[in-house]
Image: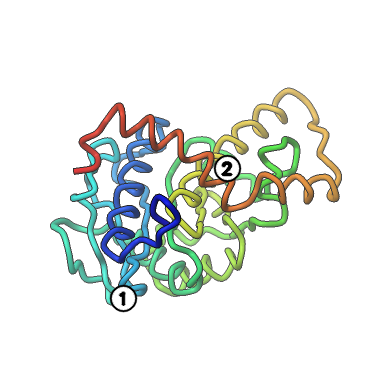
Amino acid sequence: MASGGRRRTVEEERKHRRERLAAALRLFARLGFDEGVGGHMTARDPEHPDHFWINPFGVHFGHVRASDLLLVDQTGSVVSGTGRVNPAGLVIHTAVHHQRPDAVAAVHLHSTHGRAWSTLGRPLDPITQDACAFFEEHTVYARYGGVVLAAEEAGQIADCLGGGKAVIMRNHGLLTVGGSVEEAAWWFISMDRSCQVQLLAEAAGTPVPLDPETARSTRDTIGSPAIARLNFKPLYADIVRAQPDLLQ
């Protein structure tokens, strides 16, 4: 929705998604989630729902502008923009967007704490308020078949994700989705931090989890799309003020 409750036009919505996608990538760079050429985020195009916008392969997250994003069709061809697409990103995001028509955006990055937690092959426990956002809404893809370049394995990852917010890809990292760019980005940031907290807590002792009823109630309060968008809003405002060129 645009300001004043007016629905955005297709062009306005496309601009909105591209600017939030570029901002999310800048935030990921600031948070240290970049890892060479690894990692990718996509946003479904509002006019062509079988197309998505993605960061160009080999461009540092901290340098991406809205105008640098590539539009990719269902065959994997770049139909708008100049550059290459990460082959693994192409197959993973194609499968996720196909399996989850409700998902506007998806994020998969090689963040340090997400990768560390993924090696345990376990879901996150509801040991903090923030971790409760993912309680019973994330899964573990419990195999590693190498770099994901095959459509079959990408489809299995998407199947494992199901209708949830996220999937932990064992020995690989995290993948999150959302009904907006803001949601998918915030869930990734929050999930990576929850991985960090649980790693720290388990290194110090035995964390005490919340009971399932309390975890569900907390999830329903802080794990909603509206709360995710609200949490992303100040991060977006801060990165745009600090790096306004991202909107170009």
Mark 2 vs mark 1: which is more N-terminal?
1
In the rendered image, the vertical position of residue 93 relative to residue 226, given as above or below = below
The disc labelled 2 sits on which kind of residue? Met
Residue at 35% across / 39% down in the picture? 35
Any mark on residue 191, and which? 2
Q: Nearer the viewer, residue 105 or 227?
A: 227
Q: Nearer the viewer, residue 46 or 24?
A: 46
Any mark on residue 33, and which? none
Q: Is residue 210 left or right of residue 166?
A: right
Residue at 66% across / 27% down in the picture? 200
Residue at 24% across / 33% down in the picture? 244
Element on which disc 1 rests: loop
Q: Is residue 209 left or right of residue 156?
A: right
Q: Which residue is mark 1?
A: 74
How far, Cα to Cα, is label 2 from label 1?
Answer: 29 Å
Density class for disc 1 (Cα within 10 Å; few <14, some 14-19, many ≥20) is: some
Q: Residue furthest front?
A: 4
Q: Residue furthest top?
A: 204
Q: In the rendered view of the protein, which quadrant contains the N terminus?
A: bottom left
